[in-house]
Image (cartoon, rainbow, N blue to C red):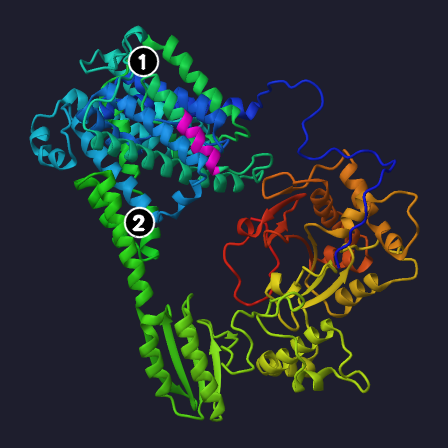
């Protein structure tokens, strides 16, 4: 039931809502972890920004401008607090092509227009749509860009000048090798060696040394060698900021400029959003589980990237995007807020103003070698293995080839076309085979069952002998209406001729067969979880002979209320559709007795369907339901020992392996606790709810931290109390002697679950008061139908 009592004024101390602002004046505070993380990210970003600017052919200062703006603007206004933005290697090819075609000032204007486009897209809240792009296409695009970058920078490493395209760079490579400059090649080789060897230094000294970024060590070492040895190599030249080039009005064909804006928008948006999602996973995987770090708001992140691109372009900087390398460094360094990203931008500004004489000593071949290694690393072996495992290597290969040979937009378009073709091929390809085993006919259907496969499915079904025992194994994730009706009609006819039909999944687990189509059959929209109270599937609540026989008692015919008709109808459907499927299993349980693996204690709320949210069946759970999912402390039940008796029976007699306390959102009992007062009449409900007062006290106590749900604070005080109540009832369980004894033996575990009704999302309590989504705890969906004990990852 759902409990609700009117609000009233009480003398209870006011509980501050978890999202209310702190009292007193606000101060700008920087955590020590953020300060150290900002320095680490700055040391990586500085040489990379100069190297990317060099690779694009833009003024070297443009890389510093983009890094500073990315840190300060995207870091402040973006939706991913720990993501670091700046000039990205993935934009190198695009920017270089725009500079060569339209000039630097027009390229800056295109960056501004791309930023405005991103702002418009964020207003339309389409950020999630970018995640619909196949990962094989995204990885292929980045790999193609990486190949193009590496081929171009290889010419600078050899002391030459790159050509305008990847094909020209490949064709010109033999001539460049013939006239390679030993000095440039030596500096580049030293840089590459430092980049590869520094992270692999062994021993304790190596662990300490690895705290300094390899990129900084490589570039600093090459600079020191070139300076001390007096080598004649081209070096960085940062002109005076007074002569820095700013954007001008776009000059060129409208369609070409529009294509450039679209390309910058596409690449920066997709890369930033995918990087933000990856950062969330990295944060959740840290030892602190990302406590205090909110999950990314993708629409806000898109707006932050748009604002950064507008300002970067206006100040003469490169396009800005979320960068994986710097973001990983930021998360790994222990950053806890956006302050680390913003401080890294501030250090870039100070370096650009105060360290110009030092930056001018950096050899250009060292920066080219750095960017070349980054480009090679963009061709990730892990990504190739992933797309191969998911049978999307063709999409990946076509995208890489298209990006290298034709261009970014064209390569992505080719990848999208191939991905659609592969999806259609998978949807249309269905294998249907038959075999006979132990007197039973097995029909294996592998692939998706769509209308395209209906003729072959129908032919195979009607070739099965009438009256035979048939097992239909469906090894696919989709069945459309045409295939469903074909299988349903055949099942009805086969059963009518005395045969049997069993439908299983790929693992052999039995599933419900399609209901036979008949005049009195249930509407196809009905499902086992359909609420009988509010859902009739178009049927009229008329009394049938079958339902009357099931429930009618003498003297009550024609007088039952409508609710009784719904209940009778539900029982009748169970007897007709479900009972034949579970009769064998229930007969076995009747013979052998119950051996549940868990005691599941949850609320009596009608919206909590225990078997649905745990995917459990008969014999799996020993369930106790009461108002508020409360566990009274031992001796506190005042004559009603029902919960204590259930705990003792489950732990000592049934020997369950775990106990789960499950709360839920919008709990009426928790609302009644918050709204109650000392002058309330001592009704049975109020006497029961006194067992929830420790939860109320725990929430108000300063000794306990606020519970968090999937990285965020609860929406209001009711949700906070619902979460706190789960934690408190687990504490009450530990006070029971049988539970404490089994816990000490290591043969029993306790778990907390919170079910958000409106989101249909279950959350699992971690080792602390923090609640995490199932997706953060389980690596795969368990196929057995049981709620498996969770292990915090």
How far apart, in angstroms, are the residues tagged by discs 1 and 2?
Answer: 37 Å
Q: Nearer the viewer, residue 299 or 181?
A: 299
The local crowd at label 2, few if under 14, some if 14 to 19, many if 20 or more residues have their Cα within 10 Å, is some
Q: Does 29 sit above or below residue 281? A: above
- Asked whether, in this view, residue 101 is left or right of residue 13, the answer is left
Q: Nearer the viewer, residue 247 or 72?
A: 247
Q: Does 133 sit above or below residue 12? A: below
Q: Which numbered disc covers residue 384?
A: 2
Q: Is residue 461 visible?
A: yes
Q: How many marks?
A: 2
Residue found at x 70% / y 46%? 723
Q: Main secondary structure of the magenta part?
A: helix
222 inside magenta stretch: no
Residue found at x 49% / y 91%? 496
Q: Position of residue 55 (x, y in %)?
A: 24, 26
Q: Which numbered disc covers residue 359?
A: 1
- Asked whether, in this view, residue 641 is left or right of residue 91, the answer is right
Q: The N terminus is located in which quarter?
A: bottom right
Q: Position of residue 262 (x, y in %)?
A: 29, 35
Residue found at x 72% / y 65%? 623
Region in magenta: 298-307
Q: Earlier in the sequence, mark 1 or mark 2?
A: 1
- Asked whether, in this view, residue 621 is left or right of residue 627, the answer is left
- Residue 551, quarter of picture: bottom right
């Amino acid at each position: 039931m759902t409990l609700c009592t009117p609000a009233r004024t009480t003398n209870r101390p006011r509980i501050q809502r978890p999202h209310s602002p702190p009292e007193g004046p606000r101060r700008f505070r920087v955590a020590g972890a953020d300060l150290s993380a900002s320095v680490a990210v700055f040391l990586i970003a500085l040489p990379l920004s100069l190297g990317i600017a060099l690779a694009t052919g833009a003024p070297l200062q443009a890389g510093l401008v983009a890094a500073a703006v990315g840190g300060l603007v995207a870091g402040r206004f973006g939706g991913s607090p720990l993501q670091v933005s700046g000039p990205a290697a993935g934009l190198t090819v695009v920017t270089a092509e725009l500079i060569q075609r339209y000039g630097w000032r027009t390229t800056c204007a295109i960056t501004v227009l791309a930023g405005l486009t991103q702002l418009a897209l964020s207003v339309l809240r389409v950020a999630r749509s970018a995640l619909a792009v196949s990962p094989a296409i995204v990885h292929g695009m980045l790999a193609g860009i990486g190949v193009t970058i590496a081929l171009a920078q290889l010419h600078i490493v050899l002391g030459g000048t790159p050509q305008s395209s990847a094909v020209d760079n490949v064709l010109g490579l033999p001539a460049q090798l013939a006239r390679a400059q030993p000095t440039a090649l030596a500096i580049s080789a030293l840089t590459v060696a430092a980049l590869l060897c520094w992270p692999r230094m062994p021993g304790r000294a190596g662990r300490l040394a690895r705290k300094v970024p390899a990129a900084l060590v490589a570039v600093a070492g090459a600079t020191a060698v070139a300076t001390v040895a007096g080598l004649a190599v081209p070096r960085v030249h940062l002109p005076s900021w007074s002569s820095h080039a700013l954007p001008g009005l776009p000059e060129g064909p409208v369609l070409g400029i529009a294509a450039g804006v679209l390309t910058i928008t596409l690449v920066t948006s997709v890369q930033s959003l995918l990087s933000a999602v990856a950062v969330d996973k990295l944060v959740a995987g840290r030892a602190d589980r990302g406590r205090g770090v909110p999950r990314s708001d993708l629409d806000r992140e898109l707006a932050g990237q748009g604002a950064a691109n507008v300002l970067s372009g206006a100040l003469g900087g490169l396009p800005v995007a979320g960068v994986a390398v710097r973001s990983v460094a930021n998360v790994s360094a222990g950053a806890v807020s956006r302050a680390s990203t913003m401080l890294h931008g501030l250090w870039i500004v100070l370096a650009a103003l105060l360290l110009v004489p030092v930056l001018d000593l950096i050899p250009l071949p060292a920066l080219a070698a750095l960017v070349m290694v980054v480009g090679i690393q963009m061709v990730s072996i892990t990504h190739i293995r992933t797309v191969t495992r998911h049978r999307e290597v063709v999409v990946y290969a076509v995208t890489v080839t298209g990006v290298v040979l034709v261009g970014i937009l064209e390569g992505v378009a080719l990848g999208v076309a191939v991905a659609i073709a592969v999806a259609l091929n998978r949807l249309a390809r269905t294998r249907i085979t038959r075999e006979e085993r132990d007197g039973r006919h097995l029909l294996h259907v592998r692939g998706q069952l769509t209308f395209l496969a209906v003729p072959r499915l129908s032919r195979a079904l009607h070739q099965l002998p009438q009256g035979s025992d048939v097992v239909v194994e469906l090894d696919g994730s989709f069945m459309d209406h045409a295939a469903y009706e074909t299988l349903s009609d055949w099942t009805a006819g086969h059963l009518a001729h005395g045969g049997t039909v069993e439908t299983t999944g790929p693992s052999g687990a039995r599933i419900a067969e399609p209901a036979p189509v008949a005049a009195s059959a249930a509407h196809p929209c009905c499902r086992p979880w359909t609420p009988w109270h509010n859902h009739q599937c178009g049927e009229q609540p008329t009394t049938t002979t079958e339902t009357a026989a099931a429930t009618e008692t003498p003297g009550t015919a024609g007088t039952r209320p409508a609710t009784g008709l719904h209940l009778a109808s539900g029982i009748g459907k169970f007897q007709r559709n479900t009972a034949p499927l579970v009769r064998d299993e229930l007969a076995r349980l009747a013979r052998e007795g119950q051996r549940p693996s868990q005691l599941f204690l949850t609320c009596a709320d009608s919206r909590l369907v225990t078997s649905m949210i745990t995917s459990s069946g008969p014999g799996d759970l020993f369930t106790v339901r009461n108002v508020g999912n409360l566990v009274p402390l031992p001796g506190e039940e005042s004559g009603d020992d029902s919960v204590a008796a259930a705990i003792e029976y489950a732990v000592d007699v049934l020997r369950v392996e775990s106990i789960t306390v499950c709360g839920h959102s919008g709990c009426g009992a928790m609302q009644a606790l918050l709204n109650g007062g000392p002058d309330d009449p001592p009704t049975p409900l109020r006497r029961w709810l006194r067992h929830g007062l420790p939860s109320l006290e725990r929430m108000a106590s300063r000794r306990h931290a606020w519970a968090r749900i999937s990285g965020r604070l609860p929406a209001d005080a009711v949700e906070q109390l619902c979460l706190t109540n789960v934690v408190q009832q687990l504490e009450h369980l530990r006070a029971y002697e049988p539970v404490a004894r089994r816990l000490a033996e290591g043969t029993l575990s306790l778990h907390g679950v919170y079910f958000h009704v409106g989101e249909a999302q279950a959350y699992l309590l971690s080792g602390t008061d923090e609640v995490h989504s199932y997706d953060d705890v389980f690596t795969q969906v368990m196929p057995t139908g049981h709620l498996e004990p969770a292990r915090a990852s």
